[in-house]
Amino acid sequence: MKIVLTGASGFLGRATHQALSQAGHQVIALGHRQAEGAVRSLDLRDTAAWRNELVEANPDIVVHCAAYRDPDFCEREQEETRRLNVAPMCVLADTLAATARILFVSSDYVFDGEHAPYAEGDERHPVNFYGQSKREAEDIAMERADSIILRIPLLMGCGPSFDESGFIAKTIQAIEREERVELDDKTMRFPTDIEDVAAAIGFLLQEQAAGIFHFSGPEGRTQFAWAQTLAALMGREANHIQPVAAPSARHATRPANSQLSTERLRSMGFDRSTPFSEVAHRVLALRT
Ligand SMILES: NC(=O)c1ccc[n+]([C@@H]2O[C@H](COP(=O)([O-])OP(=O)(O)OC[C@H]3O[C@@H](n4cnc5c(N)ncnc54)[C@H](OP(=O)(O)O)[C@@H]3O)[C@@H](O)[C@H]2O)c1
């Protein structure tokens, strides 16, 4: 397949680029500020440039990973969030050839967190602007009947360096800092390996799937409890980490428990989930 992949320089996009290339697809990989090597820079907020790219590439499918994904940034910068998280989807839906398809990477944050676990058809009710922007983009994607929406929760995995290894690296840094740190002990998080998500994307393309799919790791804990788990794996004390209901630096509300049911993907034969401890050991090994 000829695939345009957006967000290819990001945490998930890098793993997806690798998985799709290894599966033999022709991947046109797009990033923005961190684009280098096989990943080309294109600002998706530049509507004309994005439209030209799609017309010239004429792909079979666009795997759309690029987004602002920090809920606090999105809450503060709503116009800007819409420029990246929603507007490029309008261009996509308008410009793609009728035979071409969209796989949109969405989020568990389209749900309010009051009725977990969530199945694909459950009502969406985002509690923050990030979730709202994802819901809007989903709606635009779904106007094309054969689109794929893949909702995922908090990602974990190894980036190109320790510092770029997401929530596990940040939590390790908090454990090692040994100064008072507040971590959320209210919101349940289900960290999911980026390589597993990339494999799920490859699986959905191979199956010619259409519609909404959920994918999630099975292990759920609060951010505070994940820090305790990591500290135990590292053989460290973490008494300086304080459990709080909502860290004071936060702007956006989080859904209390937006666990995604993965029954649909499992019933299709995709049942991969790398344990947290395995990913944590890989991230720890990246530290110099
Ligand atoms: N991370 C999570 O825990 C999580 C959870 C649920 C859902 N998701 C969703 O998964 C997807 C991937 O997330 P991620 O964690 O991989 O995000 P990420 O690491 O922040 O990567 C974002 C990507 O978007 C690109 N981008 C940013 N501004 C752009 C612009 N103006 N034009 C074109 N590209 C631009 C970035 O390019 P440069 O870096 O080159 O500027 C980067 O490749 C997103 O849709 C996100 O909403 C993520």
Image: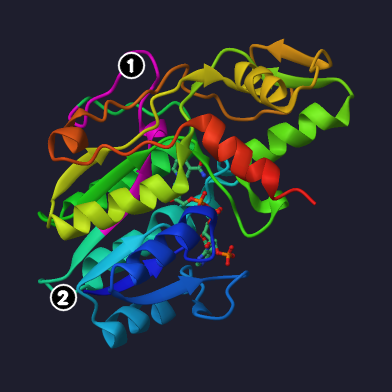
Q: Residue furthest bottom?
A: 56
Q: Residue 67: horizontal and vertical position, in percent?
A: 48, 54
Q: Position of residue 181 (x, y in %)?
A: 80, 22
What percent of the width, then of the height, locates residue 8? 47, 66
Q: Is residue 160 left or right of residue 43?
A: right
- Residue 135 visible to an observer of this rendering: no
Residue at screen point 13% across, 55% down: 207
Tell me: 227 left or right of 193: right
Residue 204 lies in the magenta-colored region: no
Q: Residue 225, relative to residue 205: is it above or below? A: above
> In the rendered structure, are the residues bearing label 1 and label 2 in contact, judged by CB atoms less than 8 Å apart?
no
Between residue 175 and residue 189, name the one nearer to us.
175
Where does the N terminus fall, quadrant-wise?
bottom left
Q: Amino acid at mark 1?
A: Ala
> Can residue 116 be found in the magenta stretch?
yes
Q: To which residue does mark 1 refer?
A: 116
Mark pair 1, 2: CA separation: 37 Å
Mark number displayed over residue 97: 2
Q: Residue at x 38, y 25 (%)?
A: 218
Q: Name the secondary structure under disc 1.
A: loop
Q: Residue at x 30, y 87 (%)?
A: 56
